[in-house]
């Protein structure tokens, strides 16, 4: 099976659904951000700080190309991966792309939970209103890229198991 790339905004469920999907399909699961950190031997925030965003995006592109050459793997991409270079074209050409679509209100609800904010430095200190504003703004910029995915699976207000079944059903129809 071709590589399955999950795309979408932070908090849409790429990692949790990706793990469940990989298990269901008997595939390997790779969180692209974790993989990049292993390759760079530093965290993404420190990579941004020491080398800059351009260096990060080049490494991200290289890692995506490496994933595209694999079989039987589910990749949870970073929230911005689809929006840079020709990443979306690469993923569409070499694999199966799935956009986990979640509206800004639901993303705000999910990401305003303190345990989620603690793991995400970019939103850690934002009020709920500021968080919603940031998500709405970023989503409006990124969604045109996400919508280029081969499959679009709405995951708003949906339990994980139900979202997983929607993904599996979409894959069967493809």
Image: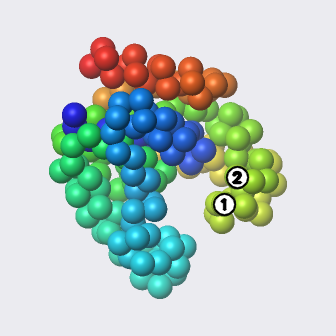
Front residue (pair 114, 38): 38
Residue 69 percent coordinates (x, y): 18, 50
| Marks 2 and 1 close (CB-CB < 8 Å) | yes
Quarter of the rendering occupied by the C terminus: top left
Front residue (pair 156, 144): 156
In this view, 99 is above or below 153: below
The residue that disc 1 covers is 119
Q: Residues within 10 Å of mark 2 (few under 14, many from 20)?
A: some
Mark 2: which secondary structure? helix
Q: In the shown orientation, is residue 159 left or right of residue 23?
A: right
Q: Which mark is residue 12?
A: none
Residue 114 percent coordinates (x, y): 79, 53
In this view, 23 is above or below 69: above
Q: In the shown orientation, is residue 144 left or right of residue 136?
A: left
Which residue corresponds to the image point at 40% horizontal and 37% vertical from the top-left? 22
Residue 127 percent coordinates (x, y): 81, 54
Which residue corresponds to the image point at 32% horizontal and 69% vertical from the top-left? 59
Front residue (pair 84, 43): 43
Mark 1: which secondary structure? helix
Count of marks placed on residues = 2
Which residue corresponds to the image point at 76% horizontal and 47% vertical from the top-left? 112
Way the structure is coloured? rainbow
Q: In the shown orientation, is residue 72 left or right of residue 128?
A: left
Q: In the rendered image, is residue 114 in sight?
A: yes
Q: Which mark is residue 116?
A: 2
């Amino acid at each position: 099976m071709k590589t399955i790339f999950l795309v979408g905004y932070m908090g849409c469920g790429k990692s949790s659904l990706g793990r469940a999907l990989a298990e269901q399909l008997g595939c390997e699961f790779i969180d692209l951000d974790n993989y990049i950190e292993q390759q760079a031997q530093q965290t993404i925030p420190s990579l941004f700080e020491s080398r800059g965003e351009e260096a990060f995006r080049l490494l991200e592109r290289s890692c995506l190309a490496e994933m595209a050459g694999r079989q039987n793997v589910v990749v949870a991409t970073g929230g911005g991966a689809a929006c840079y270079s020709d990443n979306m074209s690469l993923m569409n050409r070499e694999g199966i792309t799935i956009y986990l679509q979640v509206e800004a209100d639901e993303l705000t609800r999910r990401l305003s939970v303190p345990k989620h904010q603690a793991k995400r430095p970019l939103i850690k200190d934002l009020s709920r209103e500021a968080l919603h504003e940031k998500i709405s703004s970023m989503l409006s910029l990124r969604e045109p890229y996400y919508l280029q995915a081969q499959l679009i699976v709405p995951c708003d207000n949906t339990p994980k198991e139900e979202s997983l079944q929607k993904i599996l059903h979409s894959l069967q129809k493809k």
